[in-house]
Image (cartoon, rainbow, N blue to C red):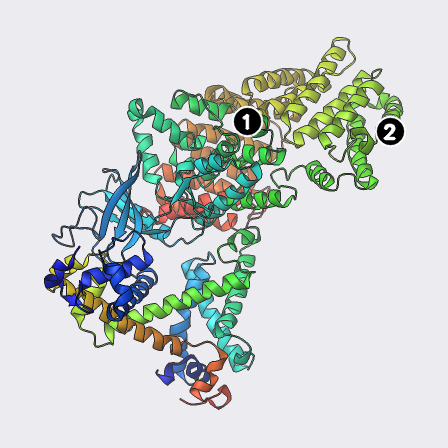
Amino acid sequence: MDLDRTTTALLNGLFDPRNAAAWEAFDRRYRPILIGFVRNCGVKQTEAAEIAQETIVRFVEEYREGKYDRSRGRLGAWLVTIARYRVLDMRRKAGTAKVERGESAMIDLDDDKSVGAAYEAERRHALLREALEELRTKSRTDPKTVKAFEMLVYHSLTPQVVAEQLGMSTHDVYLAKSRVAAKLREIVVRLEQEYEETPGDWEASGSRPSDGLRA
Amino acid sequence: MSGAGASQTGGAGCGRFTRDELELAAIARSDPQAPVVDGLPAHLTECPVCAAIVDRIAADNALLAEFAQAAPMPPAPRSTEESGPIQSGPILGYRLGDEIHRGAQGAVYRAEQLATRRTCAVKMLLRGRFAGERERIRFEREVEVVARMRHPSIVTLYESGVSRDGEPWFAMELVEGDRLDAFVRAKSLAPRQVAELMKRVAEGVAYAHRRGVIHRDLKPGNIVVDGEGAPRVLDFGLARSDDEGAAEQPGSGTTLVGEFLGTFAYAAPEQLSGDPSAVDSRCDLYALGVVFYECLVGRRPFEGARSIAELVTQKTMSSPERPGALNRAVDRDLDVVVLRLLSADPARRYDTADALVEDLARYLDGRPILARDDSVAYVVRKTLRRHWLASSAGAALLVTIVVSGIALAIAYARAERERVRSDRTLSSFRDAVGSVNPESAAGSAQLTVEQFLELIEQNAATELSAEPAVLAGVLDTIGIVHLGFEDAARAEKSLRAALDTRRALFARGECSTAELAESLHNMGRVLILEGRLADAESAYREALALRGDALGDDDIRTMLTARHLASCLRRQNRLDEARTMFRALEARARGRSDYPPLELAAIINARAFISSAEGDLPAALSQYQDALATIRGELPADDYRIGRSLFNIASTEEKLGRRVEAKAHAVQALAILRKRKGGDAATVQQAEALLARLESDPSAQR
């Protein structure tokens, strides 16, 4: 695992206002998750992007003020609490209080369980997207192997058709599938550690926010 | 498949079975439909090498399936043409199995998604569905929206495409179960259980509506109840092109009449009008009403129509019998909910599917439903029924409400000269009512307001037999209370008794013309509620003549009756007569300086509506503009009525092809409507849909 990319490391980096890299990495990781979450509250794309941005800014402010105590709850729960207020606030300003009750049925903003599950699904989606991106751009996986995987999984072609198209044997197609799956699994496991959200992971990085003022 | 393929695909594991075969065994873990290779299951229990490989393949497949769902699809060939000369059946990436269903739209097959080997359903739509590229793009865009929807009551759509033969198709989750109507029949569900099912269906519909997706073709065949008893709605958002196609091909009705009627039975009247812009999410509410009705009583609300024209006439001109009359187990609340859904006028249905969900939840909890929100008396009744007269305070409260209502009516009904006599009569009447002890009178806790009002009516008939004029006033008031309950039958009985009494008195010169006219006007209202438009028309005509005589043609009450009459004509589709009346009314209203501007605007608006229905769009536009100018100074700038007016203008401009202006007005309308100062969610949705149409049209982007 890349220790500089763990959530803990990113959070530590956020303490330093000059640490643009931490800020950007944090934003890149959580903004898509928040946008997806807010979209599922029935908010339009542009407004969702705005709310996600406000949420991140607000979180960083609160975090720097020491309001977020990681030992007392998951990062996701904290972010969602901020985003949830923003959504409700936006609805109130838009005067859609009457629809609110109905809209909240998508993600019931009053139901922690449903909110938590929706956030978790978005987080997992973001992680899988990142894993796929990494497979395509950073891993040393043979492009033909990746191509075979894409044709199988995304274009829904049969192994026979893929084999014919790429000039491989069906057996090689199966091997490509299993190689890509193995690679993706490896990436996912690592990213899950980097995205870690439980307070128990404090010890893993060996640093605390108070001494995390490093560039 | 057998071991003979080993040379081609290479052996795997211990070498006894091919990789292909081990892959199949892995798929069989999650899909019981997968073919079984002879001897392989037994082998796996003995060979740890092969078993480990199968385990790993199964785990790989699960992970890759998660990717296929969650991660974005890389640029993929959209059709077979682009992907080269691959021969793999009519739909790339799927193996089609048995046909599950065949209907007017096309056929549904059980299918296997080859990459994931998951079983799904593939629906092939009829060829020629897309008139052009624009329709195809719209279909694809809509599928994208629909494919994002995840709701327990909606069948998930996986993907769509165009087959080698140019037929559009889409793949969706395969749900094994029964059609909703068959399920209800097989289980002999009680009305309450039907309401529970319908609530879950409505939740799915509400979810889709919030995403701007309208179903347009809800019917029992599109609602499947799965093995766990959960209803699932199929084919969301995919029916639009069909509607338009059907509207364009009236001639094809000859051989398909049965099938068309079957589908059309669920279509809202505005869907059958052939004007696509009249259709919004409320058409789904109408369809849910038909489905609900059918599940409760075992037949559809309008059966027996032999042609589409006849069906349309029935739907717009008459009200269905209430479900409770056909199935005694259906109580009045469900009657009200279902009949509200079946209102010919979309404005009288629920505003949104959410409102329906809310009301069904209330019904299931035993709380007062909101469908009769406008009637305070209804809530009182419902509250009292729950705690019915557990306290005598409850009884006293109801007596007070009813008696004070009647007292008020009498005070209005009687002129000053009779005041003393009325007071005397009223007090004796109050004594009579007070002596009715609801608890003992009905002998049970089941005494309802209807029964209570009947008791009052009976008492009044005895106590006031010597005072027929007062009795008529009391009956008239009781009738109005029943009208508030939307209890047309009882309202008609009381109002008719009042009317008959007043007619007799009128003949003897003991009742004023205005009072008789008022009774007739109220009778018109009941008859409209019952959908008896012709009878309503004659009541209104008589009321109008009498009011004209007694009050003059320019009296606001006379003009009110005239407006009701004109609306009644419009509902009967007698547009010429309605237009003439509205035009005369408008002239008269404009001739008065004190005519309420909002009333005037209502008349102009009705004229615009007729112009639009007759296809005279330029006239409709200028009338809508006129209506807007009339209310502008009268209302705050952000009142929803201004927003709605702007919406009418935008919508007419769209039809006229003046898209730039239409877009500007739609934007203004939406800004106001979204503030929700009054008004309803449905109009907001309509305006949003209009703006979306305009924004997706390049000719409006200037």
- The chain to which mark 1 is attached is B
How far apart are the two marked residues, 1 and 2, measured between alpha carbons?
Answer: 52 Å
Q: Residue at x 62, y 25 (%)?
A: B525
The disc at residue B435 is: 2
Q: B231 or B248, which lies in front? A: B231
Task: Name the residue at 32% across, 59% down.
Answer: B29
B252 sits left or right of B557 in the view: left
User: Residue B362: which numbered mark, if any?
Assistant: none
In the image, is A50 to the left or to the right of B326?
left
Identify which residue, B442 or B499, lies in the foreground: B442
Q: Which of marks 1 and 2 is nearer the N terminus?
A: 2
Residue B221 percent across, percent down from the top left:
39, 37
Residue B75 visible here: no
Quarter of the image with the N terminus of chain B in it? bottom left
Q: How crowded is mark 2: few (under 14 residues within 10 Å), some or many (20 or more)?
A: few
Q: Position of residue B666 (x, y in %)?
A: 43, 46
Q: Which of marks 1 and 2 is in front?
A: 2
Q: What element carries label 2?
A: loop
Query: At which x and y percent is residue B126?
Result: 25, 37
Q: Where does label 1 land, which residue?
A: B586
| Position in image of residue B164 (x %, y %) | 17, 46
| Amino acid type indicated by mark 2 | Ser
Q: Which residue is drawn at 71% across and 22% down?
A: B494
Same subunit, tags 1 and 2: yes
* Badge 1 element: helix
Looking at the image, residue B700 sits to the left or right of residue B152; the answer is left
Rendered view: A143 above or below B129: below
Outermost residue toward the top in this view: B508
Q: Is residue B624 above or below residue B29?
A: above
Q: Is residue B458 above or below residue B600?
A: above
Q: What residue type is labelled 1?
A: Glu
